[in-house]
Image (cartoon, rainbow, N blue to C red):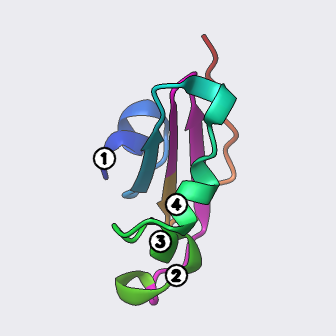
Amino acid sequence: MWNKPKELTNYQSAGYEIAYYNSNGFSTFRPLDRWEISKKGHNKVILNEGQWKKAKWEAIGVGLTEHYACVWFGTLTDTTVVQITR
């Protein structure tokens, strides 16, 4: 997962991913709420806590589909804007 930003874009650093899946789609799709209460540490990535405390997020990538939300955080500054739609 850390290499996925390099595979999809010109970003040349690791991307630290959090993801959310909801089989009901957008009707009950609240990934941020779920990440905030996550026992797997998703909120710690967002807030730079725990093992992520020393990370300085300089880039973010977001992907949404009907059932999935994925966010990558990166430490390398990236000013590129890429929009991929289907």
The quadrant in which residue 38 appears is: bottom left
Residue located 57% across and 78% down the image = 47
Q: Amino acid at mark 3?
A: Val
Disc 3 to disc 2, how far (Cα)? 5 Å
The answer to which of 23 and 82 lies nearer the viewer is 23
Residue 68 can be seen in this image: yes
Read off the magenta span. 53-71
Crowding at dot 3, Cα within 10 Å, few <14 / some 14-19 / many 20+, comes out as many
Q: Give percent across and percent down for residue 74.
A: 49, 62
Whichever of labels 2 and 1 marks the residue nearer the N terminus, that label is 1
Residue lying farthest to the top in this orientation: 86
- Please say whether residue 21 is one of the residues in the magenta stretch: no
The amino acid on which the numbered mark 1 sits, given as a three-letter code, is Asn
The numbered mark at residue 48 is: 2
Residue bearing mark 1: 3
Mark 4 or 3, nearer chain start: 4
Task: Classify 56 as above or below 86.
Answer: below
Q: Secondary structure at mark 4?
A: helix
Cα–Cα span, label 4 and label 1: 22 Å
Percent coordinates x, y for residue 58 in the rendering: 60, 68
Q: CA distance from mark 4 to mark 3?
A: 9 Å
- Label 3 belongs to which residue? 45
Task: Of the two numbered discs 2 and 4 on the same chain, state the one appearing first in sequence.
Answer: 4
Q: Secondary structure at mark 3?
A: helix
Residue occupied by mark 4? 35
* The label number, if any, that marks residue 67 in the structure image: none
